[in-house]
């Protein structure tokens, strides 16, 4: 189960149709994967997450911020290269990281 539902993301993005629900779910899944990769934490419901009160609101916000970024910037095109993650997402990841690694670092 996702930390953020498609309905919650649609509310965040002010979307009121169902035409892109599958795409939005992919963005949520990708955002959760990015959070896990940057923080070395799990968000899986059937695994101990280290968050006894449930997933914190700030992590849910981070997922929405990155998923919203993916929605708005679907592809890099032209002369502009879009490689960086939104600052709000990275900032929240730093707060919850067990060993923070900068995005783009190898």
Image (spheres, rainbow, N blue to C red):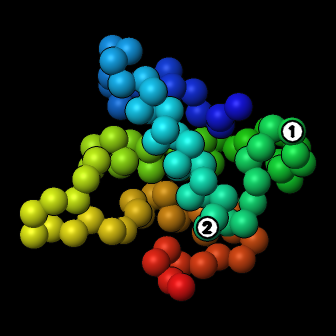
Provide the residue designation for mark 2: 38
Q: Residue at x 53, y 85 (%)?
A: 106
* Along the viewing direction, whichever of 75 and 64 lies nearer the viewer: 75
The N terminus lies in quadrant: top right
Q: Residue at x 50, y 21 (%)?
A: 7
Q: Residue at x 9, y 63 (%)?
A: 78
First in sequence: mark 2 vs mark 1: 2
Quadrant of the rendered structure where residue 17 is? Answer: top left
Observer able to see residue 9: no
* Spatial CA span between label 2 and label 1: 20 Å
Report x, y in % for residue 46: 86, 39
Q: Is residue 73 above or below residue 39?
A: above
Q: Is residue 64 above or below residue 78?
A: above
Q: Is residue 34 above or below residue 17?
A: below
Report x, y in % for residue 54: 79, 38
Report x, y in % for residue 66: 45, 50
Provide the residue designation for mark 1: 46
Compared across the picture, whether 12 is left or right of 76 comes to: right
Compared across the picture, whether 64 is left or right of 18 comes to: right
Q: How many marks?
A: 2
Whether the residues at callouts 2 and 1 have beta carbons within 8 Å, the answer is no
- SS assignment at label 2: helix
Task: Kindly give the residue lying farthest to the top in the view shown.
Answer: 17
């Amino acid at each position: 189960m996702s930390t953020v539902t498609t309905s919650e993301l649609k509310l965040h993005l002010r979307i009121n149709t169902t035409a892109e629900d599958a795409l939005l779910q992919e963005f949520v899944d990708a955002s959760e994967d990015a959070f896990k990769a940057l923080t070395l934490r799990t968000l899986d419901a059937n695994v101990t997450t280290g968050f006894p009160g449930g997933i914190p609101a700030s992590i849910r916000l981070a997922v929405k911020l990155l998923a919203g970024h993916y929605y708005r910037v679907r592809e890099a095109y032209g002369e502009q290269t879009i490689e960086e993650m939104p600052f709000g997402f990275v900032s929240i990841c730093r707060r919850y990281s067990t060993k923070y690694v900068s995005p783009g670092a190898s």
